[in-house]
């Protein structure tokens, strides 16, 4: 029996009500409501089955650190879509509505953190997970979610928070807005990233002038359309690299004329070539292009 099942049995009175409110949800893993567990920091491991649904938008009082243990994780919040590869993590502060989608047959470790714990980022961000953080979170998933501060679990949790507070963050996300037109464009390009329609063609699609469309995208995202689509391609590439796809296949799937053109795009987004980038994350936890959070 794996650790999250043990924790669910131990806390069977804390079953998350999401499934109760959404009886049609298909989930192969158990859930606990983090706000019904008074421990300030605890970790559980979750694995995704091939038929599992993406959880709907939800929020909780505790903040959540989602660590991609195997595969990748896509996290959606109101103003952006975030992607983290294996050994990366996404942080969402408490109270922010979000949904997490794990790649098929992937697994994550979720660390729930009480808002009273000091030194936490005040906004959503991605961050690298150092080898030490991976060892500690793995150990916490094997322990009860209830412990005292001076217990071995309590001391491990404190070291984890110390490491968390020092971790550099990165802005690996696709900015979006509540405008349904932009959401539709984002969903289309995520499903078909090889679509190479120009600004003029997208403007015509949305019954806008080319100039109005260009200004609208900058106003909604802070990026030009070219920069925004490049960011989207970078996140899609990261997801597929984490799934084991080759650089050559990803370049073709994203509509690049050559592998070298794809690598140039990837370097602009992440600061390194695809393979070196993934090796660096695994070895050091550094995501690249990062700055300490304030």
Image (cartoon, rainbow, N blue to C red):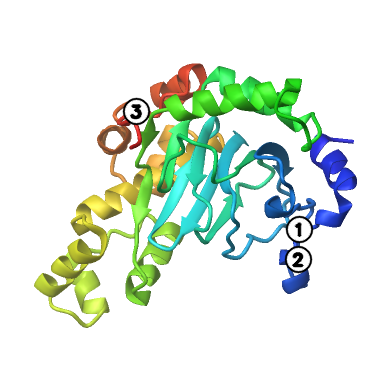
Ranked by sequence position, the earlier of labels 3 and 2 is 2
- Residue nearest the viewer, comparing 216 with 31: 31
Residue 220 in picture, x, y percent from top left: 25, 65
* Residue bearing the label numbered 2: 19
> Would you say the residues marked 3 and 2 are in contact, meaning their CB atoms lie under 8 Å apart?
no
What is the crowding at mark 3: few (fewer than 14 residues within 10 Å), some, or many (at least 20)? many
Q: Is residue 77 above or below residue 127?
A: below
Q: Is residue 73 visible?
A: yes
Q: Quadrant of residue 22?
A: bottom right
Residue 153 in picture, x, y percent from top left: 73, 25
Q: Is residue 60 above or below residue 10?
A: below
> Would you say the residues marked 1 and 2 are in contact, meaning their CB atoms lie under 8 Å apart?
yes
Q: Secondary structure at mark 2?
A: helix
Q: Is residue 245 visible?
A: no
Residue drawn at 36 percent across, 36 percent down: 170
- Residue nearest the viewer, comparing 65 with 154: 154
Q: CA distance from mark 3 to mark 1?
A: 34 Å
* Residue bearing the label numbered 3: 288
């Amino acid at each position: 029996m794996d650790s999250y099942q043990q924790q669910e049995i131990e806390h069977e009175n804390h079953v998350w009500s999401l499934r109760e409110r959404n009886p049609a949800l298909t989930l192969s893993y158990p859930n606990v409501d983090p706000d019904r567990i008074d421990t300030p920091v605890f970790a559980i491991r979750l694995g995704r089955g091939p038929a599992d649904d993406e959880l709907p938008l939800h929020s909780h009082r505790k903040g959540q650190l989602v660590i991609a243990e195997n595969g990748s994780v896509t996290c959606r919040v109101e103003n952006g879509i975030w992607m983290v590869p294996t050994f990366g993590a996404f942080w969402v502060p408490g109270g922010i509505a979000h949904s997490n989608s794990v790649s098929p047959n992937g697994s994550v470790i979720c660390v729930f953190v009480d808002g009273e714990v000091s030194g936490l980022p005040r906004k959503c961000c991605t961050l690298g997970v150092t080898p030490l953080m991976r060892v500690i979170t793995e150990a916490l998933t094997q322990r009860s979610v209830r412990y005292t501060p001076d217990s071995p679990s309590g001391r491990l949790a404190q070291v984890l928070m110390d490491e968390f507070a020092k971790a550099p963050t990165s802005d690996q996300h696709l900015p979006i807005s509540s405008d349904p037109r932009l959401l539709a464009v984002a969903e289309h390009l995520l499903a078909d990233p090889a679509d190479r329609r120009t600004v003029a063609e997208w403007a015509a699609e949305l019954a806008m002038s080319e100039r109005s469309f260009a200004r609208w995208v900058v106003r909604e995202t802070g990026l030009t359309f070219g920069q925004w689509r490049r960011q989207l391609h970078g996140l899609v590439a990261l997801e597929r690299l984490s799934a084991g796809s080759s650089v050559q296949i990803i370049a073709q799937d994203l509509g690049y004329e050559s592998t070298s053109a794809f690598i140039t795009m990837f370097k602009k987004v992440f600061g390194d070539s695809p393979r070196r980038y993934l090796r660096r994350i695994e070895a050091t936890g550094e995501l690249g292009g990062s700055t300490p959070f304030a």
